[in-house]
Image (cartoon, helix red, strand yellow):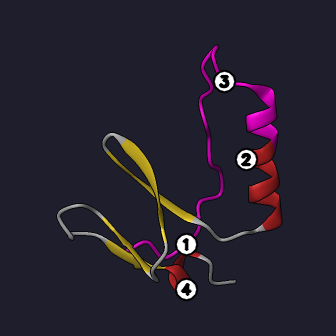
Amino acid sequence: MCVLDAPFLVVEVLSESDFMSVVIEKLKEYAGKLRLLYTYRPPALVEIEGEVISTADGSVEVSRGEIFAE
């Protein structure tokens, strides 16, 4: 499977314990196009510092350039 286009819509479901200040910071990140990559690897959310993000089994791999191509 190869992802060719950026998603049109990204939805984040918030829980009652989420703070609006955290949500606003997240929105600023999105708006600022910081081009950060994260993956969830239990038990933590980990920032990807390299150029490639992939699934744990390596079956899907996408480069930073592919994700943020304009």
Mark 2 or mark 1, which is nearer the start of the sequence?
1
Crowding at label 2, few (<14), some or many (≥20) Cα neighbours within 10 Å?
few
Mark 4 or mark 1, which is nearer the start of the sequence?
1
**Residue for point 75% across, 68% down:** 33
**Residue for point 20% across, 69% down:** 59
Percent across and percent down for residue 45 are 45, 48
Mark 4 or mark 3, which is nearer the start of the sequence?
3
Crowding at label 4, few (<14), some or many (≥20) Cα neighbours within 10 Å?
few
Q: Which residues are magenta?
A: 1-24
Q: Nearer the viewer, mark 3 or mark 1?
A: 3
Task: Work out how far the residue at label 4 is from the one at label 2, CA to CA, in angstroms.
Answer: 21 Å
Percent across and percent down for residue 13 are 59, 29
**Relative horizontal placement of residue 59, taking residue 36 as reference (left or right):** left
Q: Give the labeled residue for mark 1.
A: 5
Q: Nearer the viewer, mark 4 or mark 2?
A: 2
**Residue for point 81% across, 33% down:** 21
Q: Amino acid at mark 3?
A: Asp
